[in-house]
Amino acid sequence: MLRKKFRETIVANDLIHKGDHIVIGLSGGPDSVCMFSLLLELKDELQLTIHPVHVNHKFRPGDAERDQAYVESLCVSNGLTCKSSVVDCSALAGELGMTSEEAGRKARYDAFYEAAMEILASDEDASVKIAVAQNANDQAETILFRILRGTGIDGLAGIAYKRYERGICVIRPLLDIYRDEIEAYCEEKALDPVIDHTNNEAIYARNRIRLELLPYLESKYNENMKETLVRLGKIAAADKDYIWQQARAAYESARLPDPDIVMDRAALADMHPAIRHRVVIRAFAEAGLEQDITAERLQAADKIICRKQGPKVVEFPHGYRLEVAAGKVRICQ
């Protein structure tokens, strides 16, 4: 059943093609080990080249080294070499002024990207994907976390099956598979993955949602809470996709023939706010600002776009700004 769902997810979301190079994030936990095993089952049929990558974050002395040794041994037993790296993520977090979780993510994606670039350096025509192992439980937890923080349709869509990061396609082929299915598969195949016991400690918001809030909601309100949240994500994802299709077309229609990012003010003012906000986000992304745009900034932009009086400016993060003057909206830094 799990193998069938895995294949169906790959086909339905166009995740893997014949001849792909797959850089797989292999932590050694049940999720990534399950994905590794399932990809190996497809390896010959789809002529895949598997490139396992492991990052030792140095968060759990002793256990981190155990995880690395397990992953490297697992790869050798399957005729593959694991590209391992050791990063002091606590030190990295201090240097860059970010949380330890953010530093860990940066370290992982730096390692994935480096592996992808090495493949492309030897074959510039290669099709390279990065496979990461978020599952359906992760999807439910992510959507609930975003609801608690306040989110719109884009946030309710949750984790995408695929997206591009640094120009490389990142895929999540386990996103329709629940954690209990993954654990049963690992037991069936005698994979014996390593267990990160900090996942069972309610020390982070995400852990508290998984260990405390979701079980409470399931016991008191809806025993199928995870499935309900996943269904909500699929509905929101379809709506998000359609709205963004309209926004991309609206953006192209509003652009003016100018070497800079300049749009017609009247065209923007006539748009529905749901479209206009995404057009502004799309314009900033083209200028180089792809995150940290808040609803407050978008609403401030609305006010100066939709009013006809003199020149106005709204400051956006990282030195970017939106300027309105002479019937034009300009995105600049």
Image (spheres, grey):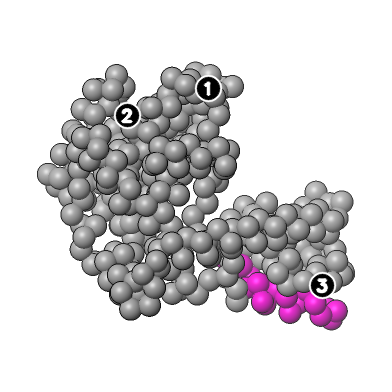
Mark closest to the chain's N terminus, 1 or 2? 1
Looking at the rendered structure, the secondary structure element under dot 1 is loop
Amino acid type, mark 2: Lys
Q: Nearer the viewer, residue 197 or 308?
A: 197
Q: Which mark is residue 19?
A: 1
Q: Residue at x 52, y 47 (%)?
A: 161
| Image height of 157 relative to 88, above or below | below
Is residue 36 located in the magenta-colored stretch of the structure? Answer: no
Residue found 45% across the figure and 30% down from its top: 22
Q: Residue at x 40, y 48 (%)?
A: 177
User: Which x, y percent locates residue 134?
Assistant: 40, 49
Give me the residue at 80% from left, 59% from top. Answer: 250
Instruction: Provide the residue designation for mark 3.
Output: 269
Q: Position of residue 65 (x, y in %)?
A: 16, 39
- Alpha-carbon neighbours of circle 3 within 10 Å: few (<14), some, or many (≥20)? some
Q: Which mark is drawn over residue 83?
A: 2
Bounds of the magenta segment: 297-319
Callout 3 amino acid? Ala
